[in-house]
Amino acid sequence: MAVPPEIEERVGDLRAEIDEHNRRYHVDDDPTISDAEYDALVRELRDLETEFPELITPDSPTQRVGAPVSTQFSEIRHRVPMMSLDNAFTFDELLDWGRRLERRLGSEGEAVGYVCELKIDGFAISLTYENGKYVRAATRGDGRVGEDMTANVGTIEAVPKKLAGKKAPSLLEVRGEVFMPIAAFEALNKRQADAGDRLFANPRNSAAGSVRQKDPSITASRELAMWTYQLGAVENGPSFKTHTETLDWMRGLGLPVNPEIRQLATLDEVYEYCRHWQEQRHDLPYEIDGVVIKVDDLRLRDELGATSHAPRWAIAYKFPPEERTTKLKEIMVSIGRTGKATPFAVLEPVFVGGSTVQMATLHNQDQVNAKDVRPGDTVIVRKAGDVIPEVVKPVLAERPKGLRAWKFPTKCPVCGGPLVRLEGESDTFCTNVDCPGQRWARICHFTSRGAMDIEGLGERTVSQFLEHNLIHDPGDIYSLDWDGVRALEGFGEISITNLQKSIEASKQRPLANLLVGLGIRHAGGTVSRLLAQAFGDLDALMAASEEEIAAVDGIGSIIARSVHEFFANPRNLEVIEKLRAAGLNFTGPERSTLPQTLAGLSIVVTGTLEGFSRDIIEETIKAHGGKAPGSVSKKTTAVVVGEGPGAAKLTKAQELGVPILDEEQFVKLLETGDLP
Ligand code: IVH
């Protein structure tokens, strides 16, 4: 059967979306969807690929393990690849796996013998020991090649620098999970909040973020721990019959092996272990997101072998998203940048999935109706350790008498204009393009981190500026009436100068960021990068036909139509012309028409700058023709130093006599290309 075009398009969209989330999770440590939502995307893609195998490509996320290797750290090749695990999301799936395996081994009815381990919610690391001495640590990377984290992981107390005992093998690769205990995570986030820094979403992200530091002294300050659970390559070591023996040997070498690991004979016992830890997971001082079940007998493991990405002898049973009950105080409606009206629940604060939740999305009118949640209800709230919590359903037994059903408002809560829902659509929209709610959301989106990243122009300031008619659309940010700003509460000369600096710096953002900022429907980070790469500058993209846009690899017809329609709308063109007049960069780094002031120069940045986020600074250097490597060497032209610089980079720069610039000097260098 020929593949229907909508399936092909969906597969392309799913791949782009999954790649984007992989990058956010593994490289940025900043995920925007829950694990459950991510798993659902991968599942949908896998199902489509099973149905239409001709669509499978070697670079499909289903064919790869984990994250691409980032260019920030040097590479380490694993001697034995670091595989991932297949997942079971229900007990039925888990038992099916076990029964299949027992059938395959011809031991139906007989006990295969398993080892059950807690699935630590951390960051996979491979340690290497040579003759008992710690010599290397690497991330999983793409499974074959990981990133060098030797110095950073070496700061973790639980990682022995020398193995115990006299008979250490000449080479030992051992795999495990680096994690941050919950108490350390909470203390770290408190410190981050006190310093006005970004909070980590959960202990997993903070562990990953703490390991992936260029400066080991930051890792050292983060109270990380590690459990090891698997061997990689071993040379001149003892041979083992079972995984249990391996773990005992590892313990004897002084490696940290989790005390809750159990050797269990039957699937019934495995089920009991999983059920127990699903209930008791919060009794542990660290986070787990499931149980890993492994066949104990190493000969049977060899017999079972592996698929392209995971062994057949192990499976991860993933706990379902966590649920708690709380009181639903109120249902409100928020207006997004496209005018979409999204109902959300205001809740009595409740601790679920690793953080306190006070609001949860209700998605749309149909969802509220279907769930029949009412203000005053006790509701079940679900959160999967991460970002967007959800109201599952009301607890009807606890509904107070006479509670009235909630009705979707007919008027926009911000501008009072009509809320419209078109036939056959699930979403409701405020159709007034002048609605201050929409304007606010559009401008906040434009200034946000993934877009133009204008520090100091957050949600509250945007509201203030809108209220005082200082801005109406993102284009106005660049011609602000500064006397008007001065007259507002809370704006002293220092905050004005800082804001001016970050607005000025934002003019240099690469085209992909500008495209994200414009808020074109369906054009998030991945799509914007593809468009920026393909067209090179905004004018070329604006002049392109729908077909030309659709011809770009990775862009489907729905996205192409949306992009084309965006540039046909005179209101959008008005904003774009304001941005052009303000001198914003309309080109991508690949075909930059910005002055190539940094051509031939190599600039290393350390610490936080006021006008540039970490994501943006490298792009800016490249867009001006320079190189932005992650470490200081003899070839480095200058080191730019912001708040909280890495000690290693600074020392190296001083040792090598590399000029050190502050932010102001760097901005001058960008403009003129001359070192001060
Ligand atoms: S064994 C070939 N055991 O979960 C087997 N993995 O979703 C390799 N994980 O990549 C993994 N706790 O990062 C194993 N007790 C445990 C684990 C564990 C956490 C992580 C690990 C793995 C991922 C798979």
Image (tube, helix red, strand yellow):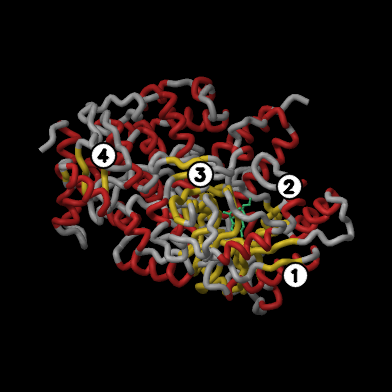
Distance of mark 4 from mark 3, alpha carbons?
Answer: 25 Å
Please name whichever residue, 426 or 81, is drawn nearer the observer in this view of the structure.
81
Q: Is residue 289 above or below residue 127?
A: below
Residue plotted at (26% across, 37% down): 507
Ligand 1 image-quadrant field: bottom right
Q: Which mark is residue 189?
A: none
Q: Earlier in the sequence, mark 2 or mark 1?
A: 1
Label 1 sits on what residue type? Glu
Q: Distance from label 3 to label 1 (Cα)?
A: 34 Å
Element type at marker 2? Answer: helix
Rendered image: mark on residue 272: 1
Quadrant showing the C terminus: top left
- Look at the picture and state if 208 lies above or below 421: below
Q: Amino acid at mark 2?
A: Asp
Relative image position of residue 383 (x, y in whole percent): 57, 63
Residue pointed to by mark 2: 302
Q: Please, what is the three-letter code of the amino acid marked with disc 4? A: Ser
Q: Residue 417 placed where, x, y %?
A: 46, 51
Q: Are marks 1 and 4 in contact (CB under 8 Å)?
A: no
- Residue identified by numbered label 4: 633
Mark identifier at residue 141: 3
Q: Nearer the viewer, mark 2 or mark 3?
A: 2
Q: Which mark is nearer the camera, 2 or 1?
A: 2
Query: In this orientation, does residue 506 appear?
Result: yes
- What's the CA distance linking mark 2 and mark 4? 46 Å
Number of numbered markers: 4
The residue drawn where x is 33% and y is 60% is 197
